[in-house]
Image (cartoon, helix red, strand yellow):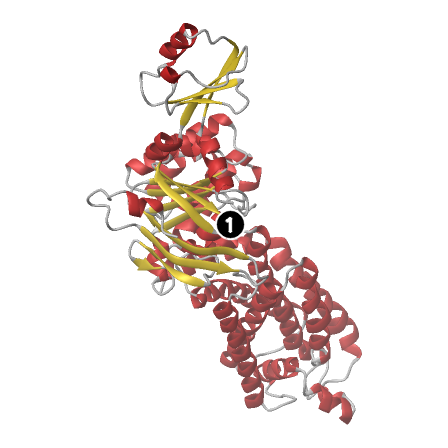
Amino acid sequence: MKPLDSLAMPRPAGASDPIIAVAGLGKTYASGFQALKTVDLEIRRGEIFALLGPNGAGKTTLISIVCGIVNPSTGRVTADGHDIVRDYRAARTKIGLVPQELTTDAFESVWATVTFSRGLFGKPPNPAYLEKILKDLSLWEKRDSRIMTLSGGMKRRVMIAKALSHEPKILFLDEPTAGVDVELRREMWAMVRRLRENGVTIILTTHYIEEAEEMADRIGVIRKGEIILVEDKAVLMRKLGRKQLTLHLQSPLAALPPELRSGSLQLSADGTELVYTFDTQTQETGIAGLLRRLSEHGIDFKDLQTSESSLEEIFVSLVRERA
Amino acid sequence: MNLYAIKAIYLFEMARTWRTLMQSIASPVLSTSLYFIVFGSAIGSRMADIDGVSYGAFIVPGLIMLSILTESISNASFGIYMPKFSGTIYEILSAPISALETVIGYVGAAATKSVIIGTIILVTARLFVDFSIAHPVWMVAFLVLTSVTFSLFGFIIGIWADSFQKLQVVPLMVVTPLAFLGGSFYSITMLPPFWQTIALFNPVVYLVSGFRWSFFGVADVDVGISLGMTLVFMLICLGVVGWIFRTGYRIKA
């Protein structure tokens, strides 16, 4: 299945050359488990792309293939124009990865581990640059500490520092804020934005929908090894993000009075509830007018509640709908 | 060639060596010194010369080989097993480096450490017993070749092992018996004829014999055969390492 946006939305000029192009990618593990069916996906230069999906949907497998940790079964991937298999050196030099698990060395110092990472990715030493990264991540004071003595949040930042040590153009963050406290999460969001301002393309997977809502330019939803949707966040929220007002009526209505009939007002099957759906993005919701007209028609209600479809609800409904 | 990566891995591994200086260098030196005191000075003084070489001197090449074999294997296997175990191998796999560069980094560092240990033991031995080296260049060549070959072997074990127990089992159950029975402490010509033939299937015999030849100019088997067998074993290990990286065996899904 093609990502929806490539059909629906004309691409802005200059973005026609995706920084990552995934075509027909499939992965079946030796156990027979098919983690990815056929994935096609294009990541635009300089965007923050959030990949959402339930556990086991294939998020980490997809990232692992792009980064060279897992061999694909079918399909191909290019990173900044370089095939990740044939031209793996050029491709991997462009990519930084922060995996989901907190996996760090134990006995090495922070400084030693970032120096190691930079060298591993083939870059000549640049202490000034590494100093800047560590300062940005509030790790400079800890540069001589052994990694095992650091807190979980600091270890997470060490992993980010390692991923950034070779000045990648693409950064993968696999569940970057899992198990991270609220304050640090905010700090990391700010850091991700700074990176984007410096031209780094960021792909993040997350369980926290609010994270995608807060950060992402575009959102992709993956389910059972297939990308089921790719959409601009704003478009997605507008299209699918609705607010609803539910009125519990005093006495059931047989039908809506003709003057009140509209697409946005629905009477429940048993006639006890009125559901009014309105757009969250507009200034004028029409609630005041609706309530006035209801009382004009003598329709009384005993209770009311409003609910907003968050990205989470959109996501849940998407994943269910296509199950 | 990603030289920065090779250097990064090499320095990382060597840093581990210096950090664990006591267990990585001091302990093999200590245990070998004990061998020299017991077998070289105490028991050796009551034993007859072998091939015109005093027993204390005779066991020097064998003991160095014994240490190099076990140290190369344990150091190289641990070096690659740890990132697999802790998960930090993701970084090696996602880095722009070839299999060859990875192996040069890890095996190079493990072999370097073995050569250092071998040299220290050699110097230590000189304090206990008197000997001279007949073919110093060949001595160094055998030292380096054996260190590299068995570091490769250790690298393979480190990749194959999926538990600490497996990591220990090959050095303990296979290599130590082969090393002890490979003529470290005796000449295989001292064995009954039947066991002499059996001994020729032990690769360590060729290593010890060749190494001893470089010291004293006498050998159990022809030095050319020793060299040839060592090279054959190295090529087999290289082939296996190549296969591992081609197939992603135990490191890549």
- Left or right, A150 with respect to A289, comes to right
A282 or A221, nearer to the observer: A282
Q: Is residue B134 visible?
A: no
Give the residue displayed 30% in from the left and 50% down from the top: A19
- Could you tell me the amino acid type at mark 1? Lys
Give the residue displayed 68% in from the left and 61% down from the top: B30
- Left or right, A251 with respect to A116, comes to right
Please tell me how crowded label 1 is: few (under 14), some (14-19), or many (20+) other residues with Cα within 10 Å: some
Whether residue B53 is situated above or below residue A266 in the rendered picture: below
B126 or A225, nearer to the observer: A225
- Give the image location of residue A291, x and y in percent: 41, 10
Which residue is outermost to the bottom?
B193
Whether residue A59 is situated above or below residue A277 in the rendered picture: below
A207 or B118, nearer to the observer: A207
Q: Is residue A108 visible?
A: yes
A155 or A1, nearer to the observer: A1
- Quarter of the image with the N terminus of chain B in it: bottom left
Give the residue displayed 63% in from the left and 90% down from the top: B221
Which residue corresponds to mark 1?
A224
- Give the image location of residue A258, x and y in percent: 38, 17
Whether residue B106 is situated above or below residue A103 in the rendered picture: below
Disc 1 element:
loop
Which chain is mark 1 on? Answer: A
